Image: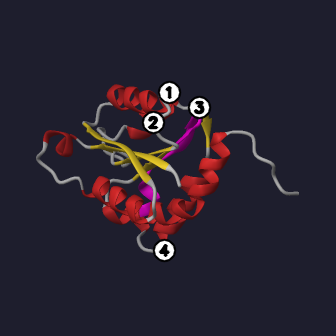
Amino acid sequence: MARIAILTVSDGVSRGTRVDEGGALIEERCREEGHEVAARAALPDDREAVAVQLAAWCDAGVADVVLTTGGTGLTPRDLTPEATRDIAERDVPGIPLAIAQEGLKKTSYAILSRGLAVTRGKTLIVNLPGSPKGVADGLGVLFPLMPHIAELLAGPVEHDG
């Protein structure tokens, strides 16, 4: 299974004034699915700090997949996608599209999330919304793909056809 790092991006969670529901849900679901939670942290909505943390985990090979939660909305402090873009090497545009499509089955607000999916080195980074419902939708899309994602990022793979 995959090694997963979880980064919650929230001023309130990082200050301890808000419960980290999104990060907790990711960790719980990862363990249920048999994935290793390799790291978990919470940072304020600070573009540079988020970019530094993401790059550090990727460059050190801490995880196969880094899942962020929070900071993907439209408020001026929501800068997780920008921080992710700052350190990205390649885009994986189908993942946010599939997550938005899944979320749209439940709420029209899902289209407002600006989350990205990118790679840096051998790590996939996926920005999930901060809401537990948005996190659940994202995990529902990602978990069936996780074994293949880890295999693809690990190195050369023979493809059928």
Considering only order in the chain, which callout, 3 or 1, is on the residue closer to the N terminus? 1
The residue to which callout 1 is attached is 59
Work out how far the residue at label 4 is from the one at label 1, CA to CA, in angstroms.
Answer: 36 Å
Task: Find residue 105 and name its label.
Answer: 4
Question: Could you tell me the amino acid type at mark 3?
Answer: Gly
| C-beta proximity under 8 Å, tags 1 and 3 | yes
| 140 in relation to 41, above or below | below
Q: How is the image coloured?
A: secondary structure
| C-beta proximity under 8 Å, tags 2 and 4 | no
- Residue name at image x 76 percent, y 46 percent: 157
Q: Is residue 114 magenta?
A: yes
Q: Is residue 93 visible?
A: no
| 159 in relation to 133, above or below | above
* Numbered disc 1: secondary structure: helix
The residue to which callout 3 is attached is 121
Task: Find residue 62 and name its label.
Answer: 2
Q: Residue furthest left?
A: 17
- Residue name at image x 27 percent, y 36 percent: 43
Characterize the local packing of mark 2: few (<14), some (14-19) or many (20 or more) Cα atoms within 10 angstroms: some
| C-beta proximity under 8 Å, tags 2 and 1 | no
- Residue name at image x 54 percent, y 65 percent: 101
Q: Nearer the viewer, mark 2 or mark 4?
A: 2
Rendered location of residue 42, percent (x, y): 26, 41
In the image, 86 versus 59, the foreground residue is 59
